[in-house]
Amino acid sequence: MDGYPSNLQISEPTFCRSEVLAGPERRRRWNAEEKARIVAESLAPDAVASVVARRHGIHPNQLYGWRREFRPAAALTNFVPISVEAACSAARGRPPRWMGRRVVASRS
């Protein structure tokens, strides 16, 4: 490096400083009771999930994962079967709504 000019003039020796962070563990362990309380708070009518997550120091994706974890299994399987009957519309003398409008061409 002696052959190249330097814009940075350093005349004294340099040193590196390191810090050891002593504090709570970065990866927090949440028990089921704490998770349930936070999930219930996030499901309140006017609650915003990302604000609730930020308040408790977790990422919103973690909160959504907990919501899935605490969702009852019955909520995933309940659905109402439907049946479509075109006979009702045909009985009234008009085509069903899903068929669209009829186009009548006029001859002149």
Image: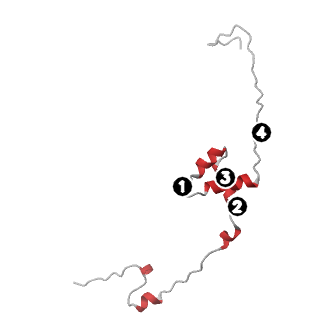
Up-down relation of residue 88 to residue 36 (above or below):
below
Q: Amino acid at mark 3?
A: Ile
Nearest to the observer: residue 3 or residue 33: 33
Asked whether the beta carbons under mark 3 and mark 2 sit within 8 Å of each other, the answer is no
Measured as percent of width and height from the top left, residue 66 is found at 69, 56
Mark seen at residue 89:
none
> How many angstroms separate mark 3 from mark 2 (CA)?
11 Å
**Which residue matches tag 2?**
70
Q: What residue occupies the far bottom of the structure in this picture?
A: 91
**Is tag 2's residue or tag 1's residue first in the polypeptide sequence?**
1
> How many angstroms separate mark 3 from mark 1 (CA)?
14 Å
Mark seen at residue 25:
4
Asked whether the beta carbons under mark 4 and mark 1 sit within 8 Å of each other, the answer is no
Helix, strand or loop at mark 4: loop
From the image, state whether disc 2 or disc 1 is nearer to you.
1
Q: Residue at x 33, y 81 (%)?
A: 103
**Is tag 3's residue or tag 2's residue first in the polypeptide sequence?**
3
Mark seen at residue 38:
3
From the image, state whether disc 4 or disc 3 is nearer to you.
3
Q: Residue at x 50, y 86 (%)?
A: 85
Q: How is the image coloured?
A: secondary structure
Asked whether the beta carbons under mark 3 and mark 1 sit within 8 Å of each other, the answer is no
Up-down relation of residue 75 to residue 61 (above or below):
below
Packing grade of label 2 (10 A; few <14, some 14-19, many >=20) is some
Can you tell which quarter of the image residue 71 is in?
bottom right
**Which residue matches tag 1?**
46
Is 46 positioned to the left or the right of 90 in the image? right
Q: Residue at x 64, y 13 (%)?
A: 8
Packing grade of label 3 (10 A; few <14, some 14-19, many >=20) is some
Packing grade of label 4 (10 A; few <14, some 14-19, many >=20) is few
